[in-house]
Amino acid sequence: MHAQETTFSELIQGEKQFQVPLYQRTYSWQRDELQQLWDDVLELVEEHLEGRTPAAHFLGSVVLAPGRISAGGIQRWLVVDGQQRLTTLMLAFAALRDHHRERGAERKAERIHDLVLVNKYRSGDDHYRLLPTQADRDAFTACVESSPRAGGPGNVGAAYRFFLGALTEGEENDGEAWTDAVETVLSGLLSIVEITAAEGDNVYRIFESINNTGVGLSQSDLLRNYLFMCLPTRGEAVYRSLWLPMQERLGPANLELLVWLDLVVAGNSRAKQSEIYRDQKKRLEPVSSDEAALEAEIASLARRAERLMRILEPEREPDPELREVLERLSRWGGQTHYPLALHLLDRVDDGQATPHQAAQALVYAESYMVRRLFTGYSTTGSNRVFMEMPKEIEKDDDPAEAVRRFLSKSQTGARVWPDDDAVREAIRTRPFYKAGRSNQRFQVLRRLEESYGASEPVDFAKARLTVEHVLPQSPAQQWLDLLAEETEDGQSPEELHAGLVHTLGNLTLSADNAKLSNHPFRRKQEILDFSALRMNQEIAGRERWGKAEILDRAADLADRAVRLWPGPVAGTVPVDDEWSGWKELRAALLAMPAGTWTTYGDVAALIGTHAVPVGQHLASRANVHGAYRVLTADGRVSAGLSDGQESGDVRTRLEAEGVPFDEAGRARRSHRLTTADLAALLGKDIAEDVEPSPQADDEQQSAAGRFEKQLRDNQTKETVDGVLNVLRFWERQGGHLAYGRASETSCFPTARFGSAPGSRALWPLALYPISGTVEVVFQYLKRRPPFDDEPLRRELMTRLNEIQGIYLAEAKLDLRPSFPLEVFAEHSEEICGVLEWFAHTAALAEARRMVGGNPDTL
């Protein structure tokens, strides 16, 4: 075998083809892997634009074996390992080419197409530089050929759409030079080690050995080995007294985190967790021959380990004010604040700042994150902002004011800290229930409740509270009649409901979600009035609950929010004054798979406005990507189009993508993306009511009773009997039933593997007894083996679509398409067959895993 370092453009140059063998699994990279690669690309782009010469980023290795020469004379290379990287880069270039075309740079687009994506003068399979497995081939070639179905469902289409969206957003912020820098980085600044097998090597044996290796050394392992190699006389004592206690206190993952944070707090704001060893070794080399100096470095790291533990476990912090804000940030989740928090604890312990100053600095950091959550700004770039802070504020006397000034300057992109007016407007209009992660939404409501200063505050550690909609998500007609009294001209009660239901003014916390359900407000009043939460008692004191009441409560909560989370320095004005909702609209349209459509109302509810302004915005802006996919509420093409096309052209284009229309010119509703679908495509957190909750035996029985009661109260006897027959069959087969905790008690037929808490579980469906729907949870299965393998999800969809009355659109393979509960009941025998296949497939994969096989490659 021969190995050499190369770049992507060098690897693919010339007439050749990289073919992924059939024994390889399908393309599997999802948003997390794509975002990690993109973050690395953006860092190199930034350095390039600043005039520096960035060091190439090591992407990994690609193992190739010579294949047969095609009839057309093309040398084929079998991709033994590295197909995920190759496919991802090809899709990034396909998106870059199409981005060039959309902005009229046809020559740049042609260059990418001819030199990167295809063998220009070859036809058939030889035309493509990369030929994926059969399961991925159609989706991949659709992207390469820019066909109407490019960017469809599945991981290939999702990756193409990810890059198209990232490129569009980047150029909007930074201009054409930025896009050219992206191409430079993708072509020449991503380092790849090309390993070429020799003729006669057993390719499959090489593949097996690569994919069945033991656990490699971590970055902290490499650093430890280097340090103690440089301590020949003092190593044993230093290891026993400093390193080992630190290692045992933190554990492997947190030790890795510490040595990365140590670099960041020391001023390396560009430190990567994947390159900790390289950067630490470079930093320590000047003292590598001085054992006393190295011991001092390890001692300093050990002190920082103790401070990191106060961040990870805030109850260790002795100062009550500082402990309280560290606890709030811990409950918020994530590691964004860690560099700042560790820097502040360094200063407190060294006597350079008081605990009060550190606490106030962290309050500003918390406010920055909460206010961006309210107003819909992306979290992308926030990590970099906080990594830069230790270096920027190091010499300031008052760290709190330094943090506030730092976050207030350069108000653009990832640095926008919304002011009071922006927060008030967002709380009034934006769908807060779709913002951020579920724990973050909960923490905001918790803090608002605590702001009432109840004499007997709720013990949130013991109370089993969840987020509750006062105006229900699935309103009965009585609620819609109430809303009809407050609609504006041309607005339906359903559209008004969509614009109000997820806003902060309509949300509260409750342990009685199941009791509250979608009952009329009078019934909810009786339950909320007995709540220990002050915010619920306030809601119960209202005479009615409609638009006026929701907006009035939103105004009160906004007053509390701007006091709890202080804003930027007075007079700070964002450089980019475009409303963030319009950017979110464009991002949502870019994220839509080919073969789907949505409505003006769905988009409006996503971004926190009304359908009419959405239509006006799209009509006033030329060439908004995907604007033709936005239709009227009944699925018709709007008369006011944004891209100059005739209505017939739009319909033809949608039909070419796979959207069927009926004789009346209405798009099939099975292909429509709801507000929840759009939120999922944007990577927003999923609502609390769509996954089963761990429950004790008594809770399980209670939830089962609620589900059956809701089923009997809302469905026909035939549907009830059919549903219960299927669920009993599932239990006889050894399956379990899990339940949600939302007001509508959902049921999940679940296959469990092991009885211990946290053991693996899989479920294909979610049954909703009030709304009468069955969701197929592809969105969850795509992250859970073995159904993270796309062909298995497609087979599940195919088996369900063979049942009369079920039509799941292929374009929704990554989402949660649904069908009527009555169809589930009517065709119970066929449904049982699908569930049996699902359980068998999951059990087979689990058996392979338990005996040490690799279900991903078998």
Image: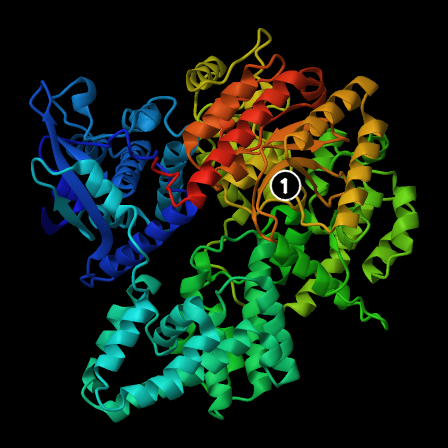
In which image quadrant can residue 109 be found? top left
Q: Position of residue 394 (x, y in %)?
A: 41, 82
Q: Position of residue 761 (x, y in %)?
A: 57, 43
Q: Is residue 66 visible?
A: yes
User: In the figure, is residue 114 to the left or right of 95?
Assistant: left
Amino acid carrying mark 1 in the image: Thr
Q: Position of residue 247 (x, y in %)?
A: 41, 76
Image color mode: rainbow
Picture layout, residue 558 above or below residue 626: below
Name the residue rendered at 72%, 65% in the picture. Answer: 461
In which image quadrant can residue 734 be found? top right
User: In the figure, is residue 692 to the left or right of 412?
Assistant: right
- Number of labels in the image equals 1
Element marked by disc 1: loop
Residue at the spot of label 1? 609
Q: Position of residue 628 (x, y in %)?
A: 48, 25
In which image quadrant can residue 728 be found? top right
Quadrant in the picture for the C terminus: top left
Q: Is residue 174 visible?
A: no
Picture layout, residue 780 above or below residue 794: below
Q: Is 825 in front, or is 653? A: 825
Q: Residues within 10 Å of mark 1 (few under 14, many from 20)?
A: many
**Please, which residue is most extreme toward the front here?**
851
User: In the figure, is residue 394 to the left or right of 815?
Assistant: left
